[in-house]
Image (spheres, rainbow, N blue to C red):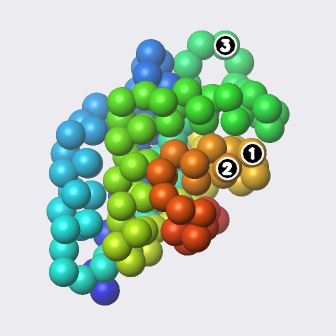
Amino acid sequence: MDTYVVSDLHITQEDAPCLFADGTRLLLLLARLAAGRVPARLIFNGDTLDFLEGEGAPRLGPVQAAQTMRQIAGGAVGSALLRQVGVLLARGSEVTLRLGNHDLELALPAVQTVIRDALRQPSSVAARLQIV
């Protein structure tokens, strides 16, 4: 199984400043991995999402973090990214989402629920997303 590591994308809410500016290339990479004959291992190595960008103070509480995650997952890049991760998982690939200092909120169950829902896969597939 080939392993791919992607780091520090800092994907934010649609209207917030974002360090990551090439969602098209990322989605092409994920589509290529999903179309492969052999499942892949994909590791998002921290700061994939960015809960510290955007307007106002950081949203660290569970309710606020889940709301921010819904906004990220509703944006063009966030939505497409999570759907493609769902396709990878459905085709047998392993996907790990590691926490970074800008997305520590990924450890919160409420945020993980939003992410797993955004994968648009059955719960048995969505549960295979590793968040560590």
List the residue tagged with mark 1: 110
Q: Is residue 90 visible?
A: yes
Secondary structure found at label 3: loop
Secondary structure found at label 2: helix
For the residue pair 124 and 96, the one nearer the viewer reads as 124
Residue 61 to residue 108: above or below: above
Residue 108 percent coordinates (x, y)? 75, 49
Amino acid type shown at disc 2:
Thr
Indicate left or right for 75 with 30 as reference.
right
Numbered disc in front, either 3 or 2 = 2
Amino acid type shown at disc 3:
Gly
List the residue tagged with mark 3: 56
Residue at (28%, 32%) from the top-left corner? 21
Residue at (53%, 62%) from the top-left corner? 122
Numbered disc in front, either 1 or 3 = 1
Residue at (43%, 28%) from the top-left corner? 75
Residue 84 percent coordinates (x, y)? 35, 53
Amino acid type shown at disc 1:
Ala
List the residue tagged with mark 2: 113
